[in-house]
Image: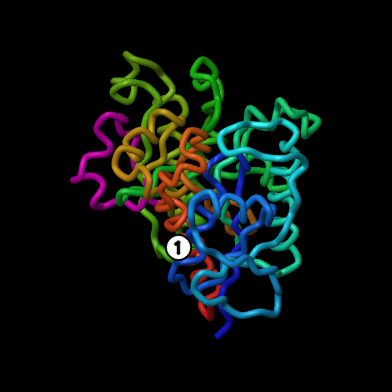
Amino acid sequence: MTLPVLAVTSGEPAGIGPDICLDLAFADLPCRCIVLGDKNLLQSRAEQLGKTITLQDFDPQGGKPERGILEVLHIPLAAPCQAGKLNPANAAYVLKLLDAAYQGISDDLFDGMVTAPLHKGVINDGHASDHFFSGHTEYLAEKSQTEQVVMMLAGGGLRVALVTTHLPLKDIAAAITRPLVESVTRILHADLRDKFGIARPRILVTGLNPHAGENGHLGHEEIDIIIPALKQLQSEGIDARGPYPADTVFQPFLLKDADAVLAMYHDQGLPTLKYAGFGQGVNVTLGLPFIRTSVDHGTALDLAGTGKADSGSLMTAVATALEMARHIDPRS
């Protein structure tokens, strides 16, 4: 049986990405994890952390390495890197990691990608692209020419997807449209079915306003947009229920009959999830023509090189990508 092969991008070199990727050398996982990054950086960080690890060049024809060996696809840094010290000169390097992972998937070398955290600010400061870099999700959607993707986080027994992602609060109400609610829900439903093996996904949808608009007294988005969208989706056979007030949708008696919650915006849905499973959560990009998962935390510059970084979320992200790969290809 062929082992699944996952590309793991090591992310911002000054952050904890390289640190947590090193732990993959000691993880007992039924797959091969290929870390994309600078071998010299990984070696020096291992020495800094007191970890004895052998770095081995990635061989597409190879098998699973022994414990203590980390497979690496070497991509050189643009400038020297010190743990905890951002350097905009390495912005292009971080994007090269994503480009290489995507190319490897396109070439059938990898079955999916797992991404360690990057720092959006330093990428934009480094002018590594011609336009504003808003995150992994948007970059990979553009790279793969995917018209629409959906951000979903999972952890603590919850799955929470978002209708809108990284928008200022003042712009969210205008961004919530009936076509958007419908298309996001369809993507969520399809990937829960096809990539997570849930035959009939059950989705709880929040309202936008407090108390889900309270029958129009606290806003009309529920009446004008969300409820009509849900009626259309239900007519298509999609089990999307709501709209529920966001402050009560996470009650156990509701969640026990649900496979995912769809929230209208970032800080409506994710605080509860991160409280329930921070450090063990995973970010999944739905709608892409390939598997992509990520950690649920940032670069944690203050922890880089200290030995205090927790690799739990990375391990969960790898396990989730592996689960998804098995549903897409049951032979793996």
Residue 245: quarter of image? top left
**Picture quarter with the N terminus:** bottom right
* Number of residue marks: 1
The relative height of residue 18 versus residue 113 in the rendered view (above or below) is above
Q: What residue appears at the point 61 percent right and 54 percent down from the top-left corner?
A: 42
Query: In the rendered view, does 145 fall on the left or right side of 295?
Result: right
Percent from the top left, x then y, of residue 90? 72, 38
Residue 204: quarter of image? top left
Query: In the rendered view, does 137 fall on the left or right side of 151?
Result: right
Look at the image and tell me whether residue 332 can be seen. Answer: yes
The relative height of residue 220 versus residue 178 in the rendered view (above or below) is above
Percent from the top left, x then y, of residue 208? 40, 25
Q: What residue appears at the point 63 percent right and 27 percent down from the top-left corner?
A: 121
Residue type pointed to by label 1: Ala
- Check disc 1: other Cα within 10 Å, few if <14, some if 14-19, many if 20+: some
Return the residue at label 1. 319
The relative height of residue 19 versus residue 162 in the rendered view (above or below) is below
Element at label 1: helix
The region drawn magenta spans: 239-260
**Residue closest to the far right:** 130
